[in-house]
Amino acid sequence: MKQIITLIILVSLTNCGKNIKMKKFNSEYNYSVNIPENWSEYETDEKNTNAFFDTTKWTGNLRITPMNYEVKNSKELLSEELAENNAENIDWKNIRGIYYVENQKNEEINYWYLIENNKLYICSFTIGNLNSKSEIEIELNKVAEILKSIKTE
């Protein structure tokens, strides 16, 4: 019974996230993405990268790095990364890719290699001040919704 109640709560919280107001971010690196209104970009030393965070509660850091080349053979590129990182395939409406999680120095880092319009984007999300698995899952669903909105300009 506890599991059913937990599942109902988790589903209702996940559905609440769909009502988040979004704003369009136009990157100087020739892409756009929709981010929640309460998220802002911050400066990073990483080349060719946009970095974002939630300004109301630090839930983590999202980085999006578009690569400066066109992907000719996406299946080959993704299958190599899929095998090396024990990743899972992603097949969103306009985006194909892979997703995997890495633990480094007591930090969980989530990685996405995404191909949209033959352009490769390497994205990562480092978990912030989230205490429970359900909070982390909700935030990762929010990040996935953000990444689904990537459009190459």
Image: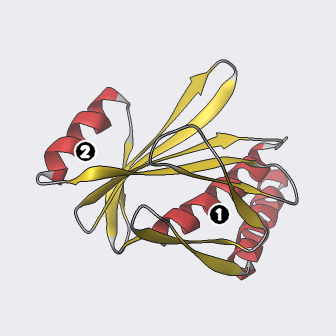
Amino acid beneath label 1: Lys
Give the residue drawn at x 84%, y 52%: 2
Reading the image, the residue beneath label 1 is 142
**Pointer 1 or 2: first along the chain:** 2
Reading the image, the residue beneath label 2 is 78
Q: What is the count of numbered marks?
A: 2
Amino acid beneath label 2: Leu
Q: Residues within 10 Å of mark 2 (few under 14, many from 20)?
A: some
Q: Quadrant of the N terminus?
A: bottom right
134 shown above or below 18: above
Most foreground residue, 143 or 31: 31
Query: What colour-coding does the image apply?
Result: secondary structure
Drawn side of residue 47 relative to residue 12, left or right:
left
Query: Residue 147 at what x, y percent from top left?
Result: 50, 63
Drawn side of residue 13 relative to residue 137, left or right:
right
Looking at the rendered structure, the secondary structure element under dot 2 is helix
Q: What numbered label is drawn on residue 58?
A: none
- Extreme left residue here? 72
Query: Residue 4 at what x, y percent from top left?
Result: 77, 60
Q: Is residue 52 visible?
A: yes
- The image quarter containing residue 40 is bottom right
- Tags 1 and 2 touching, CB below 8 Å: no
Looking at the rendered structure, the secondary structure element under dot 1 is helix
